[in-house]
Amino acid sequence: MIEIKTLKKVDMTGCTFIEGFPGAGLVGPMSISYMVNKLGMDYIGYIVGTAFPPLVSIHGDVPLPPCRLYYSKKYRIVALFAEANVVSETAIYEMSEKLRDFIKAGKMSQIISLSGVPVENPNNQDVFALASKKGTVDRLKGFGMKSIGEGVAAGIGALMLMYASMDGMDDVNILVPVNPQMIDPRYAELAIKSINKLLKLNIDTDELEKEASVVEERIKSILKKSKETKDGVNGSKEAGPSMYA
């Protein structure tokens, strides 16, 4: 079960929805956390349910859901910041469908998903992209992103891309090549610079390394606690979240 709860009523019409669940290189969480701080986005809601491990994030002594929604009226952005991942393949489908309905209900205009792609020797200048509309690919190439051509995509972002194609909605998956054995703020820097181009923003990444290290330690702690909780509850065999999902 997954529920999307809003804490305040805001006008999301025409907004860009940005998401990035914990995955290879933690590209999504590092990027979105930094954007939320730099753009001064408001905390407007959260996502809860049995699809997540039974954990609560503590920030400034305040308990918060590990999956939260933020909003910027000025920049017309709704961002999903996730410090924990869903726990099963079934939950991935449910989360994708819930987000699809939420984006439609809010009358948002486009979707951007951020993730890392594990490779042996990542080139820290490359960024790849997928799009729900064929014509969008050419525009992305103009921003210096590379197309995939042929291949397979997986996860929440990939399913949302498929749904967007069905719905005739703009959706872009930004894919940063990463070394899955390390977390590097430069991965998030590439993602943010791509968002700057797509949304005509000017987010300064000079302080990214400091912020990224905080996010990294926070998510590692949540993942560790998640594993401890899973192992300690009735010997559960249910798959837990993975930093490299």
Image: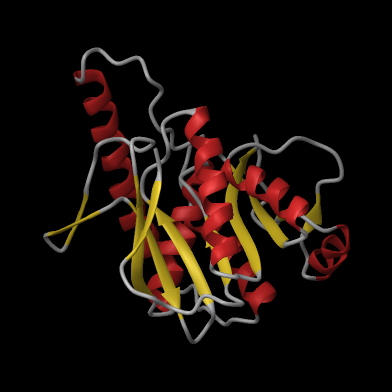
Give how far across and how far down residue 46 sits, in percent: 35, 57
- As rendered, which of 119 and 80 lies closer to the eye? 80
**Position of residue 55 in the picture relative to residue 22 (left or right):** left
Look at the picture and state if 147 lies above or below 107: above
Quarter residue 18 falls in: bottom right
Quarter residue 191 falls in: bottom right
**Position of residue 240 in the picture relative to residue 118 (left or right):** left
- As rendered, which of 173 and 244 lies closer to the eye? 173
**Position of residue 158 in the picture relative to residue 51 (left or right):** right
- As rendered, which of 227 and 204 lies closer to the eye? 227
Give how far across and how far down residue 173 sits, in percent: 67, 54
Asked whether residue 171 is in view, the answer is: yes
Please tell me which residue is depicted at 41% across the width and 31% down the height of the picture: 87
Q: If the image is split into quadrants, where does the N terminus sit?
A: top left
Please tell me which residue is depicted at 63% across the width and 62% down the height of the picture: 111
Please tell me which residue is depicted at 37% across the width and 43% down the height of the picture: 84
How many discs mark residues in the rendered view? 0
Asked whether residue 180 is in view, the answer is: no
Look at the picture and state if 133 lies above or below 88: below
Residue furthest out toward the bottom = 74
Look at the picture and state if 11 lies above or below 236: below
By what rule are the colours in the image chosen?
secondary structure
Look at the picture and state if 35 lies above or below 87: below
Give how far across and how far down residue 203 sits, in percent: 52, 78
